[in-house]
Image (cartoon, grey):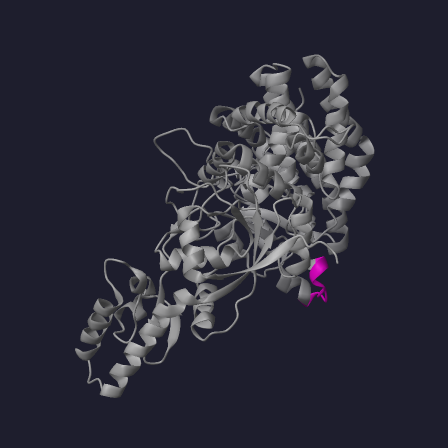
Amino acid sequence: MAITKFKEVGYTLSKLLDDIQMGEIGLPEIQRPFIWPNTKVRNLFDSMYKGFPVGYLLFWANRIGDGSRQIGTDVKLRVPYLLIIDGQQRLTSLYAVMKRVPVVRNNYQTEIIRIAFNPLKEIFDVTDVAIEKDPEYIPDISLIWASDIGIFKLVDSYLSRLKSTREISPEDENKIKSSINKLDNIESFPFSILEISGDATEEEVSDIFVRINSEGTSLNQADFILTLMSVFWDQGRFQLEEFCKQTRIQSENKPSPYNHLIKPNPDQMIRVDIGFGFKRARLKNIYNILRGKDIDTGEFSDKRREEQFSILKSAQSKILNIQTWQEFLKCIIQAGYRSQDMITSEITLLYAYVFFLIGKYDFNLSPHLLRKLIARWFFATEMVSRYTGSFESLMEQDLSRLRDIHSSNEFVAYLNKIIDETLTDDYWEITLPNELNTSSARTPVLFAYYASLNLLNAQVLFSEIRIPELLDPTIKSKKAPIERHHLFPKGYLKKMGINERRIINTLANYALVEWSDNIEISDNAPFEYVPKYEKRFSTKVLNQMYYWHALPKNWYNLDYGEFVQDRQKRIAKVIRKGFEKLNM
């Protein structure tokens, strides 16, 4: 008979919640943090109330000490023996409602989940303003399990409120008491637990998770590295999560990592930790290194694990330094990228941060030189989508070559060499114009064009206002101050027999205009609306504006197909001109 890696154990809901509160059951957050929407929490209580099965829970027996997180905010009383692998959403939801503990949403905002119950109809609902005022509902079922209230007092309060609005028959009163008592007894609901043995490896745990949970997200190497941090360096994981949380919260009174370019998650910042600290990109290799594994012998050592975590701690202290982070973000702004809307690859931005950190701490580059270098690097790698697809492999290769570099001059030359080998004359004159032949609204080359217009301090088409002013992410209004406008409007092209969306919405048919002009232009033919707007400007100003917006003289009289091909080449030239503003 095969030796199993698990055993099946029965728990009641009250036993589960008590063990969570006491710290017998811990939460390593091996999955990405995720809290169900309130409607799923409502459905969970409804199923349990009706006696329906709600699935297995998967636990991992792990006696490694004091890093495991708890559901809720109470201080744990014991070292966790069981770690929750699958069932995090269910248990977090049940604990949050029945213990009235706030949950943290994906946006890092806290919320008290309030589920309502109608004892007469025996239905659950998510509490809202209407339900709050409806006397037929108990607006928050957590009151049933609140020790300072008690079920009898709650029943009396509910009946008193309901009787103030209408007559209650003896049958209805009995139904109400029976329903509330049935809900109270949900604490005895039985759960089946699959408990994985403590000698199972993380790889085996991941495999088991995937095999029994077809709807679950596969666990990846970042998940396991975060779990290792939970076990061996809980403070480091907390710092990482807190940093990511603060990137989303604007602060006026103290330094903050808040910004308009990226709101990273912990598993993304782990890649910066690994890239800067270990000069590696493949997380699988680092996971084994952090466990203390000798790559040659395959043996594990506590001393080796402590040494590797020491490297990680040193790297993360620099990575999460707010001043350093904000200095790096200035590089991205200097490259012409002003907001998160312009970033198509967050991994490209974070890898640029890795090179920024290497330049700053390993090669001591001056702030001015480093900012110019990383601005060029990000512009180039973002525009050509360098880190898409098998990005780990390419970054691993880029970092491995740094092992032969020993001076700041060599480091600068190395990055510039990659840029120059990527952005050849053939790229600018052939590849880039071809890539601009697209109708995609989110393509790297489009935002490279916008970045170039920022760098060139260009005016908005047919406006005296500069593009950097209207692309400022701090400007908030109901209508965007600047909009993409079809130079050859859709309605006009359809009248000309051009109906294919891809052709109408090609990138070369768009220009940035003020939203008021966009509304006014409507579907008018270019030869009708353009002369009117040209009268606003002198010939010199108009020629410069047409250069920025890649428009030839009298473009509005051109054949549409000819116009599109000509403008693709002109846009490529403007992008190149913008990039040249970053030359060192």
Q: Is residue 535 left or right of residue 396?
A: left
Is residue 390 visible in the rendered structure shown here? Answer: yes
Residue nearer the viewer, 534 or 421: 421
Q: Is residue 500 magenta?
A: yes
Residue 503: where, in percent of width, then height? 72, 58
Q: Residue at x 60, y 34 (%)?
A: 540
Where's the N terminus, which quadrant? bottom right
**Vertically, is 516 above or below 553?**
below
**Vertically, is 436 above or below 165?**
above
The answer to which quarter of the image holds residue 17 is bottom left
Name the residue furthest front.
Answer: 1
Residue nearer the viewer, 16 or 154: 16
Q: Is residue 524 magenta?
A: no
Q: Please give the count of numbered marks on the rendered protein.
A: 0
**Highlighted range, magenta:** 495-503
Is residue 453 visible in the rendered structure shown here? Answer: no
Residue nearer the viewer, 256 or 162: 162
The answer to which quarter of the image holds residue 411 is top right
Q: Is residue 569 left or right of residue 535?
A: right
